[in-house]
Amino acid sequence: MRSLSILFLSFGVVSARYASNLNYRSPSENHPGLGVSIHKVVKRNNPSSSWDPAQLNFTHGVASGDPYPTSIILWTRVAPAADNDQSNVTVSGYVPLWNHETEEYIQASAAPVCLDYKVSTDDSFGSAVDQGTVYTTSDIDYTVKVEAKNLEPYTTYYYQFTVCGSDNSSPVGRTKTTPRPDDDVSNIGLAIYSCSNYPFGFFNAYGNAVRKDSVDYVVHLGDYIYEYEEGGYGWGYSLGRISLPNKEIFSLYDYRKRLATYRTDLDLLASHQMFAWIPVWDDHEVGDNTYRDGSSHVNNTEESFVYDGGVSVDQRKMNAVRAYFEWMPIRQVDMDDGLRIWRSFSIGKLIDLIMLDTRQYDRSITDLYWNTHYINEISNEASRSLMGSRQEHWFYRQLSESAGRDATWRLVGNQIIFSSLNLSLLLGPEDPFNYDAWDGYAANRNRTLSHLLKHNISNTVFLAGDTHASWVSDVVWNSEHRYNPITGAGALAVEFGGTAVSSPAPVGQNITLAAANNMTEWAVGHNEHLMWNELYYRGYFELHVSKEAIEARYFGIPNTRVKSGLEISLANFTVKAGENRLSRPVAGGVVEAGTLKGGRRVETNATRDTEHE
C-alpha cells in the first residue's frame, strides 16, 4: 500500500507541474484544437529521464504580462533546439527535432524539461515571494507560462527561470503589478505600440522606452507579426532580417517559427524583459484583413482551401491563435471561449483599460480589396458589428461600470481607427473611407457614441494602431452634437492613433518627407475633427496619465535600417479631465513633424535630415 500511495503522490506532483504551465490549456482546454491533454502528456513523457542541462537553451529571453494587483503572467522558452517542427510526435520515446545547421533530424529525448522559477523584490533574489517548479515539452513548443501569485499591488518584481538541478538560468526579468482598483495613484505611464514588420527594419522603438525607463507598462495594439511571405518585402535581405519560414504561413509550426523569428530582435527582447505587456492581436497575427469567416484572400471556398495547401480558414485561425497564446505573456480570459482575447484592467482609481478585439472574434465581413464598393454600400447597416453582440454588450457594460466606480479615465485599446476620416486623396473619390476600420461599421460606432452620450460617460480616450501613421482627433458625432473645431466644443472623446514600429507608411516605404507633409496637409484640411496627422516616421507614443490630464507624447525613429536608440519628439498633446477634447491650443500650437490644424510645424535639424535612403 505504501508503494501505491507513493506512486499516486508522484503522479499528482508530476501532473501539477505540467498544469502549472498554463500553455498546456491555453487558450482553451475545452477545444481539441486549442489545448493539450495534460493526462496524455504525463502518460507519454517520462520525468525520470532528464535532459542534460547543457543541451538546453533559453532561446528567446523572458517576458511578463497581463498584470493584476496580486499576480502576473511570466513567460520563457527553454529548448534543445531553436526549432520544433514535430510537435506531439514521438518515436520510441524520442522527439525528432530538425537541426537547421546540419540539415538533419536529431533524436531528442521525450523527457519533459523541468524548470524552477523565483520571484523577488530584488534582482539578487535574497528572498522569494513566489516560486515553483514547472514542466514543458515539445507539445507547446517548449514554452513556459506561469502565474506568479501572492504579490503586492503596484510593486516592482524580478523573476528568473532555472533548469532544475543546475545553474543554467534565464536572464533576470523585471515586471510590475498594477495598483488595486480603489488605490489612489498619481501618475501611470504607458508605451503604446503596433505593427512591427521584421524585414522592414530594426525594432528600435521597443528599446527606446527601455533605455529611457519612461513608463510603467507596455500596451500593444496588434500586428506583432505579419503572416505573409516577407523575403521580397522591405530591406530584409540587405539587413539580414528574413522572417522564417520564408513563405506565407498557415500551419502551427509556421506561426510558432514566425513568432520565434520576430522574438530575436534585441530591442523587442529588452522590452519584454523589462516591462509587463498588455497585448491584443490585430489582423496579421492570423491573416490580412481578417473577419469572422476569412481574410483578404482566404475565404471558406474550395479555391482558398487549395491555395492554403489544404488548411481551412478555421484551422488556420486555430493554428495562429494557439501559437499566439503559447508565445505571448497573456492570460486566458474564458476557458470556454478560446478566441476571446478582449479583457479589461483596472489600474487604481485612475484608469480602466478596455482591450477590444475588432478583428478576429465575430466581425462581419470587411473590405477584402475586391469588394470595397459593396462594403461602402452596406457600411451603415445596423446588423454589421466589428466585435459581435457578446463582446459589444460587454464593451458597453465595461464603460458604464468604469464610470460607475468613478475611475478617472477610460482608455479603449482597439486595433483600428475609430474616427471617420475622408481619405480620398489616398483611396480615391469613389470609396474615400477606410472600410476595414470603424468607417465600415458606422452603426457599431453610432451605438458606441450613443452609449457614451446617453450615460454621460466622460474622459474616454480611444487608442488605435493598424494604419502605420499617426492620427490625433477629437471624437465627434455631428448628427447629434454640433462640433466646433476651433474650440473643440461638441466633442465626446479623444482618439490617439499611433504609427508602426517598423511597417511602412500607408503610401509606401520610400515616401519623401515633402510628399508625406503634402498628404497630411490635405488630410487635416479635409477632416474638421482631425487635429494632427503624420505619415513619414515609424515610432510609438507614450501616455502619461494623472487625475488632472493625459499627456500624449509622440516619438519618431529617424531610420529603422540602422539599430539605434535615436528618436525625435514629433508632437505632444494634452487632454484635461472633464473636457472630452484636445486642449487648446492643440499641441501648444507647434509640432516638429506632420500637419497640425491651426498650428505650425517647426522642423529641427533632426527632422530635416532623416529622409529615407
Image (tube, rainbow, N blue to C red):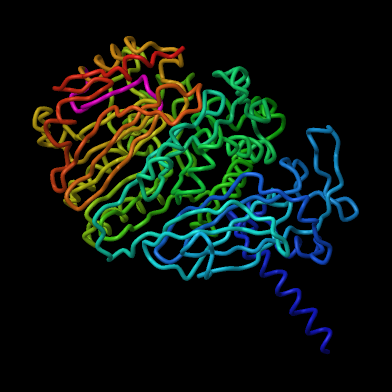
Between 547 and 292, the one lying in front of the other is 547
Q: Which residues are magenta?
A: 526-538
Q: Position of residue 4 (x, y in %)?
A: 82, 84
Q: Nearer the viewer, residue 603 or 429?
A: 603
Query: In the figure, is residue 96 to the left or right of 324?
Result: right
The residue nearer to you, when weighing 516 against 601, is 601
Quadrant of the snapshot with the N terminus: bottom right
| Residue 85 placement: quadrant | top right
- In this view, 73 is above or below 200: below
Does 355 sit above or below residue 39?
above
Q: Position of residue 505 (x, y in %)?
A: 41, 20
Is residue 12 one of those drawn in magenta? no
Image location of residue 190, percent across then percent down: 35, 45
**In magenta stretch: residue 527:** yes
Q: Is residue 466 left or right of residue 268?
A: left
At x 34%, y 31%, the residue is: 555
Q: Residue most toward the right?
A: 92
Q: Quadrant of residue 192?
A: top left
Total numbered circles: 0
In the rendered view, does 53 fall on the left or right side of 288? right
The residue shown at (38%, 33%) is 540
**Position in image of residue 288 (x %, y %):** 52, 29
